[in-house]
Structures are given as C-alpha cells and as structure tokens.
Image (cartoon, helix red, strand yellow):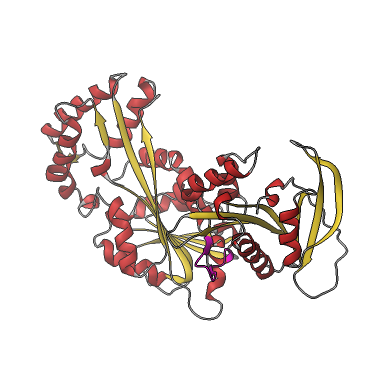
C-alpha cells in the first residue's frame, strides 16, 4: 500500500465540512434510496465518514485499485450498505445507475481527466450529481518566502518525484481550476465551484508543523530505495519557514459539483431545490425572477436597510439559503441585472407562508411586488400547498391592498404584535388548490414584518 494511510485519513477528517456542504448543495438528504459511487475509496475511512451518516443512501460502491487498502475497508466496515470493488475507474462498467459519483481527492490522479469526467456522466442517472474535491498547487500562498522555497519544492516534485512514483505518475497537482471546464465539456450543467482555504493564520507552532506534514508527506518518498537529496534539502528549508510565527501559508481546496442534465418527463424531479422551486418568470416590464444566492446579499441588504427599521442580518438570509430546505428565496432583476426586490416563502405540510418581501423604494408601484408574490404563489402551489399565508402591519394599507388584489383575505389579527411603532398584525390567507380543508389549523409561527415592504 504505497499511500500514507495516517495522513490520508487525517485529511479526510479535516475536510469533512467541505464534503457535507457539497452534499447539502446537491440535495443528497432528499434523494430516495440513493446509490453512490466513490472513486478512489482507499481504505474506506473517508467513504464511511462522509457517506455513512446519510440514512437515505441505499448503497455505496467503493472503487479502488489497491487490493491491500480495500482489504482494510472490508475489515473495518460492518454497514451492509457499503461494498468494495477492486479496479480502475477506466475499467468500471458505467451503467447509469448512480445518483452521485464522488471523487474525494482522487480525480487528480486519474490518467485522463476529461475521459474521467465523461465516464462520470455515463455512470449517473439523469439529474444525478458528481462531486469532485481536489487541489491546485498553483494557487497556494507562501510569505515571507524570499528564496521561493515553496515554488522550488513544487518544481522539484514535478521534475524528480511525481513521474517516478507509480501511483502519482498521472497526478495533476494544479487540477482544481481546470475542473469546471472539464465537467462542462463532458456535458454537466450546471457546474459550480467552491474554494475553501486552510492557512497558518492563528495557528500555533505544532499546528503549523502538522499542516506542513500534510502538505509534504508524499513529496519525499524513497525512489528505487533512495531519497532525492535536493528535495530533502528544500523540504528542510520549507519546514523552517513553518517554524516562524510570522510565516503565512495558504492552501485552497476545490469542491466542484456538476449535474447530469435531466431528460424525460420525470427528470426535473431530481433537480436541486433552488433551481426547481424558484420559478423563472419574465414580466411585461422586463423584470426577471430567479433563485436568490449568497452572491445577491449585497444588493439584497441595500434594499433591506432602506425598507425597514429593523432589517434582517445578512447571516439570517445566509442561514435560510444554506440550511432551510422548506424555504425558497427569489430576487427580481431588471434588464441590467440589478436586484430590485426579493421574496421568501416556506412550504410546510400543505401550507405556504410568505416570510419576507421587499422592493427597492425607488422602484415601487411598478408591479414588482405583485410579480414576486405571483412567483411565491406558483412555487408553493407547485409544492402541493393548499393555501398561502402571511402577516403584516394593520396600518400598512399599501401592502394590504396589494395582497387583496391577488386574492388574499384577512382572517384575523394579533393585538400589539409589532413594535417600533406598536401595531397589530393582520393575518391573511389565500387558497391555492381545490380540496377540503384538513382541519389542521396551521398558525403563523414567525414574525414576518418583511411582508409589509412591497
């Protein structure tokens, strides 16, 4: 087993957050009886650590050419959902049966990366996902490093070490930035890239040296029984830099996710929640409604602060976007791409709830608020909601008129619910689908002052 098992397992532990964030992005928890292929599973530690917590996964196939490593995986795993196969990805039979193909720091070692991306597409069902976690040495930072020791280490590795070690002969250590194009060329759409960083900032000496070990353990192997002397000298110099309190080193990890395009009448069911639920609408005045992302929060917060004396914090929006699977948030853009309004709603147990809506004060009374509400109604209706609810200040006559115009009716009030200034809350409801009331008496459980901002 040529790989350093201890260091590889340490990397698996330190990188778990990036994997689980990617799995959340693709909606892994919402897949039913998911089938996963882990390419380059090694001893299975990373495979079980990353995929074991998901009870909805029906099967995980761990694939690796290293027989000794796979024997360790078999010995250490008592979860019958996991099975282990020896072999290369190039020879693996792609039958289109998987919901997820996962490369945990293995993609960069494959002989032909473009062929591997195309093979991953063939392995997936329509709407399935690939997740690649990989590296890019070209984007690492080292300072102060006046003698360019880090760059010389990387150059020596490429020249004298990597090509002579069998399991790294095809490794591309500058693979991260290339993955977007590789997946797009293979036919994946959409493709998204997230870069996370690990740096020496705020680390003590022991932590810096542990990071150094993870960055270098594979760069100084014995080749034909001998150690490369030049590499040894360079690594000793680099280690001295990590000893220094003023030394800054940063290493990026690329997490790249891509979806196989859906096909057939049921294909769209596997699309991620944000794309499927925030319906794309084009209004007569050229406004476009589309899913809100965290990149929109600058413009969203500019409107938020101009619209309300007690604005939501940016983190409140971010937490909704990242973690609330019952919520959808959408923005309205003008023809120049500027955000002019936004809306959020939940759909829970057959009831929709508008939680937040605001329009740029300079763009009000132009139909943007009605457009956003229509988007929310269509989205909740598509999720099976029987009614949509909201609440707003009693004295916000403009907003009440807007909601009445699209079909909402007031059904009750909560005295003195709002402050600054004190005002009653009016509860409004609109039926969305025909059918008997289930009698559940859903209540509005959230202070949604944002609904008054249209």
Is residue 349 shown left or right of residue 234? right
Q: Residue at x 14, y 39 (%)?
A: 156
- Quadrant in the picture for residue 427: bottom right
Quarter of the rendering containing residue 248? top left
Q: Quadrant of the C terminus?
A: bottom right
Residue 185, horizontal then vertical, whole percent: 30, 67
For the image shown, how many numbered marks are present on the structure? 0
Q: Is residue 280 magenta?
A: yes
Residue ID at (52%, 75%): 267
Residue 89 visible, this angle = no
What is the x, y in percent for residue 100?
47, 62
Q: Is residue 172 above or below residue 90?
A: above
- 372 relative to 382, above or below: above
Residue 304 vs residue 321, the one in the foreground: 304
Q: Nearer the viewer, residue 163 or 75?
A: 163
Query: How far across and down, in percent of the image, does residue 343 sit?
Result: 61, 55
Q: Position of residue 35 (x, y in %)?
A: 52, 65
Q: Does residue 281 appear anywhere in the picture?
A: yes
Q: Quadrant of residue 210?
A: top left
- Is residue 271 within the magenta segment? no
What residue occupies the far bottom of the structure in this picture? 264
Q: Residue furthest top?
A: 245
Drawn side of residue 422 relative to residue 206, left or right: right
- 185 versus 232 height, above or below: below
Horizontal side, residue 434 vs residue 326: left or right = right
Magenta segment boundaries in residue numbering? 277-290
- Residue at 36% of width from left, 70% of height from top? 187
């Amino acid at each position: 087993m040529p790989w350093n098992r201890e260091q590889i397992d340490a990397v698996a532990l330190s990188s778990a957050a990036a994997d689980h964030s990617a799995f959340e992005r693709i909606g892994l928890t919402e897949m039913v009886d998911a089938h996963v292929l882990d390419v380059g599973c090694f001893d299975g530690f990373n495979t079980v650590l990353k995929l074991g917590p998901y009870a909805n996964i029906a099967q995980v196939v761990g694939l690796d050419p290293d027989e000794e490593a796979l024997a360790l995986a078999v010995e250490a795993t008592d979860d019958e959902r996991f099975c282990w196969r020896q072999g290369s990805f190039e020879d693996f039979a792609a039958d289109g049966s998987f919901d997820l193909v996962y490369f945990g720091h293995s993609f960069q070692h494959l002989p032909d990366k473009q062929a591997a991306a195309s093979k991953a597409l063939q392995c997936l069902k329509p709407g399935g996902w690939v997740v690649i976690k990989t590296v890019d040495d070209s984007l690492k930072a080292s300072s102060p490093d006046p003698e360019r020791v880090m760059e010389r280490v990387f150059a020596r590795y490429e020249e004298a070490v990597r090509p002579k070690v069998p399991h790294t002969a095809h490794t591309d250590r500058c693979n991260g930035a290339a993955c977007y194009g590789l997946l797009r060329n293979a036919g994946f759409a959409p493709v998204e890239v997230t870069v996370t960083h690990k740096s020496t900032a705020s680390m003590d000496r022991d932590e810096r040296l542990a990071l150094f070990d993870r960055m270098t353990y594979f760069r100084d192997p014995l080749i034909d029984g001998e150690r490369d002397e030049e590499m040894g000298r360079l690594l000793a110099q680099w280690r001295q830099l990590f000893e220094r309190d003023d030394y800054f080193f940063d290493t990026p990890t690329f997490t790249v996710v891509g979806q196989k395009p859906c096909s057939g009448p049921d294909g769209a069911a596997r699309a991620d929640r944000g794309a499927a639920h925030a319906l794309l609408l084009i209004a007569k005045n050229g406004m476009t409604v589309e899913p809100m992302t965290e990149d929109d929060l600058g413009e969203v917060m500019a409107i938020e602060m101009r619209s309300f004396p007690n604005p939501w914090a940016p983190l409140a929006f971010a937490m909704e976007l990242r973690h609330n699977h019952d919520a959808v948030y959408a923005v309205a853009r003008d023809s120049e791409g500027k955000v002019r309004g936004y809306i959020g709603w939940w759909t829970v147990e057959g009831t929709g709830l508008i939680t937040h809506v605001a329009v740029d004060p300079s763009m009000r009374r132009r139909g943007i608020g009605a457009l956003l509400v229509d988007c929310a109604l269509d989205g909740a209706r598509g999720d099976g909601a029987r009614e949509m609810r909201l609440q707003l200040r009693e004295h916000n006559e403009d907003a009440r008129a807007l909601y009445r115009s699209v079909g909402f009716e007031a059904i009750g009030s909560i005295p003195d619910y709002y402050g600054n200034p004190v005002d009653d809350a009016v509860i409004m409801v609109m039926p969305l689908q025909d059918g008997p009331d289930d009698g559940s008496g859903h209540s509005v459980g959230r202070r949604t002052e944002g609904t008054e901002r249209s």
